Amino acid sequence: QVQLVESGGGLVQAGGSLRLSCAASGRTFGSGAMGWFRQAPGKEREFVAAMSWSVSGIYSRTYYTDSVKGRFTMSRDDAKNTLYLQMNSLRPEDSAVYYCAAEGTGTLKHGDDYKTWGQGTQVTVSS
């Protein structure tokens, strides 16, 4: 069974950076898809980024929602079984609880595309 633990959230000023981590246990990153979502108070959960890999694990592809393109970067460390979300040039509207998701299929841009979720980590960007 896959388990995900996010970390790295916190309070940062607008224009600052944070790096979120998602440590996965119970699987390797040889194949499949993982994603990041966020949910602000009173709003629906929103797709942020996703990464899919070939069966060999050699080739990967990343997807970003338009509002974070050029500012956020998703990456992985196979040796640590950890997924990252580097967030630069943060804006107050980026404030939300960020969730890591695994075992994704389909479009990878909807919550229902994923089977496993982490507990979330809070990101707050002050103006």
Image: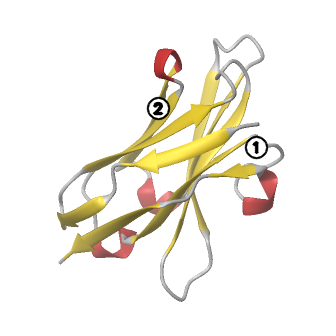
Quarter of the image with the C terminus in it: bottom left
Residue lying furthest bottom? 42
On the rendered structure, is 121 left or right of 124?
right
Seen at 63% across and 11% down, the residue is 58
Q: Position of residue 43 (x, y in %)?
A: 56, 83
Seen at 44% across and 51% down, the residue is 69
Q: Residues within 10 Å of mark 2 (few under 14, many from 20)?
A: some
Q: Which residue is mark 2?
A: 75
Q: Position of residue 12 (x, y in %)?
A: 19, 63
Seen at 33% across and 49% down, the residue is 8
Q: Position of residue 3 (x, y in %)?
A: 65, 41
Q: Viewer-proximal residue, 41 or 80?
A: 80
On the rendered structure, is 120 left or right of 13?
right
Q: CA distance from mark 1 to mark 2?
A: 16 Å
Quarter of the image with the N terminus in it: top right
Which amino acid, mark 1? Gly
Q: Position of residue 20 (x, y in %)?
A: 38, 46
Q: Viewer-proximal residue, 91 or 99?
A: 99
On the rendered structure, is 34 left or right of 124?
right
State the mark number for residue 104: 1
Element type at marker 2?
strand
